[in-house]
Image (cartoon, rainbow, N blue to C red):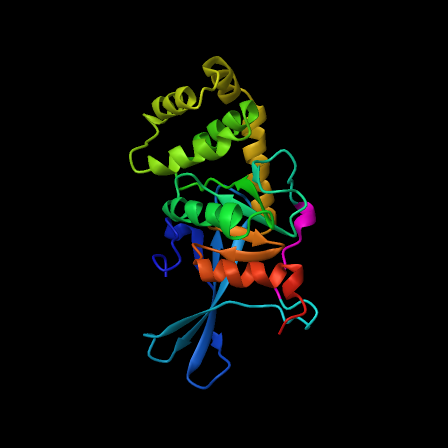
Amino acid sequence: MQKRLLVPNPKNMSLGPSTPGPFPGVSSRTVTITNPAAPGQKAEIELFIDDSGKTILIAQHYAVVDNSHPWEQVDLKQLHLDDRATIGPATAPVTIIEFGDFECPYCARAFSEIETVVNTTYKDRVRLIWKNFPLNVHPWAEQGAVAAECAREQNPAAFWSFARDLYRDQNEINPQNLRAHIDTYTTSLSLDAKGMNACILGKTAEDRVQQDLKDGNAIHINSTPTFIVNGVPVVGLPSGEVFDFVIKGQLPEHHNTK
């Protein structure tokens, strides 16, 4: 279960008592996963196990919704969305909020996908807002996020080029050479090196990254990338078909179609 649930330390997992399951020959247990870096944060997963102990079902609960709100929704009121990297018009009928990590390989693969969605497939109908969510298991992700925020402070458009560079060089970057990469990107994007250095050493960009992390934890983000499409969560690396399905379901011209 530790490997299946991607939990680095088994000490962060606890297994509840066995109880009778919903069907004969099936028992139920709850796995509780805690995050030592965020006291109080935990996730509970229900398991169904057959009598042999060789077959396990991992259950996910979904809220029952009425026909007027067929999508499971995230409450966006608690998220800080101002002063963030964005693409697309503020008047777009669909807003996608991406929680991403620059050291996450799936985020790197999703980056070109989401850029195509916003800049080409649904141009002017979708707005993208970036939220940083560097995971604890990635040693340079948080500093990479701070540097990207500093690039954005100097030139909002430079954020996306900076992000693209980080993703492109992801496999080559480590905590020891991260700063050399940042300096290279700073030069190539014609950003002010002294300003970047002051920003990286300062608190403003760091505080913004920390606020994004708090926002993500508040709505129970636990993996990257996670996309919130008009409040509808899309977790993981989605295919173009998944984005099409969710986005079209949010566009006004599709609301009354069957």
Magenta residues (range):
71-78
Camera-side residue of 54 and 156:
156
Q: Is residue 21 above or below residue 124?
A: below
Between 12 and 229, the residue placed more toward the observer is 229
Residue 227: image x %, image y %?
53, 51
Task: Report if residue 220 is visible in the image.
Answer: no
What is the number of callouts on the image? Answer: 0
- Left or right relative to 92: residue 29: left
- Please, what is the dominant secondary structure of the magenta stretch? loop
- Residue occupying the point 47% across, 45% down: 115
For the C terminus, the image quarter is bottom right
> How far across and how far down the image is residue 27, in percent?
45, 77
Is residue 71 shown left or right of residue 143?
Answer: right
Please state the horizontal and vertical placement of residue 19, each as a whole percent of the image.
49, 75
Residue 9 visible in the current orientation: yes
Query: As drawn, which residue projects farthest toward the top?
Result: 194
Viewport quadrant of the N terminus:
bottom left
Image point 39% across, 34% down: which residue?
166
Magenta stretch: includes residue 155: no
| Left or right: where 201 falls relative to 255 | left
> Does residue 92 lie above or below 191 as drawn?
below
The structure residue drawn at horizontal position 55% and vertical position 52%, both measured from the top left corner, is 122
**View extreme (bottom): residue:** 24
Q: Is residue 23 above or below residue 172?
A: below
Rendering quarter of residue 58: bottom left
Residue 241 horizontal/vertical position (percent): 46, 62
The answer to whether 49 is drawn above or below residue 185 in the figure is below
Q: Residue at x 42, y 38 (%)?
A: 102
Report the front residue among 211 and 85: 85
